[in-house]
Image: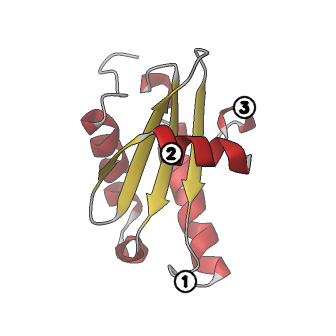
Amino acid sequence: MNKAYRLRKNREFQYVYRRGKSSATAHMVLIVAKRRDKGIKIGFSISKKIGCAVVRNRIKRQMREAVRVEIPRIKPGHTLIFVARAPITKMNFGGLQKDMVYLMKRTKVWMEEP
């Protein structure tokens, strides 16, 4: 995923947690907030409860890749945070990607045509 799309600063995460709307599955939560500009920012949150650093980094890499291919279909003007839950460690990449697309459709940030 291009670094221009990444959410990095703690205050940006806190803003989305406070103002955003959430939707969840058994494996992850998506929190979405509107932006003032027409950009897209995406962040990932994976707790230490999920596993050791190797497991957390693998999950984060898979989540970044799953979103990277779908960026053209995300409506501009939104900030997204994907929060991983413990059962995500048993998921394969295809299931992870399906869950992410499902959550984006459910929160109405997904466009059928890019």
- Point out the frontmost of discs 2 and 1: 2
SS assignment at label 1 = loop
As measured in the structure, the alpha-carbon distance from the residue carrying label 1 to the one carrying label 3 is: 28 Å
Where is residue 42? Give x, y as percent.
57, 40
Which quarter shows the N terminus?
A: top right
Q: Residue at x 60, y 34 (%)?
A: 41
**Residue extending farthest front:** 18
> Quadrant of residue 40 in the image?
top right
Say which amino acid is labelled 3.
Answer: Ala
Q: Which one is in front, 46 or 53?
A: 46
Left-right relation of 21 to 37: left
| Residue occupied by mark 3 | 4
As measured in the structure, the alpha-carbon distance from the residue carrying label 2 to the one carrying label 1 is: 26 Å
| Residue occupied by mark 2 | 18
Q: Is residue 70 visible?
A: no
Q: Which one is in front, 33 or 62?
A: 33
Label 3 crowd bin: few (<14), some (14–19), many (20+), radius 10 Å:
few
Asked if 67 appears above or below 96 in the picture, the reply is: above
User: Which of the two discs, 1 and 3, labels the residue nearer the N terminus?
Assistant: 3
Asked if 34 appears above or below 57 in the picture, the reply is: above
Say which amino acid is labelled 2.
Answer: Arg
As measured in the structure, the alpha-carbon distance from the residue carrying label 2 to the one carrying label 3 is: 23 Å
Where is residue 15? Give x, y as percent.
59, 41
SS assignment at label 3 = helix
Say which amino acid is labelled 1.
Answer: Gly
| Residue occupied by mark 1 | 51
Q: Residue at x 57, y 54 (%)?
A: 44
Q: Residue at x 67, y 40 (%)?
A: 6
- Point out the frontmost of discs 2 and 3: 2
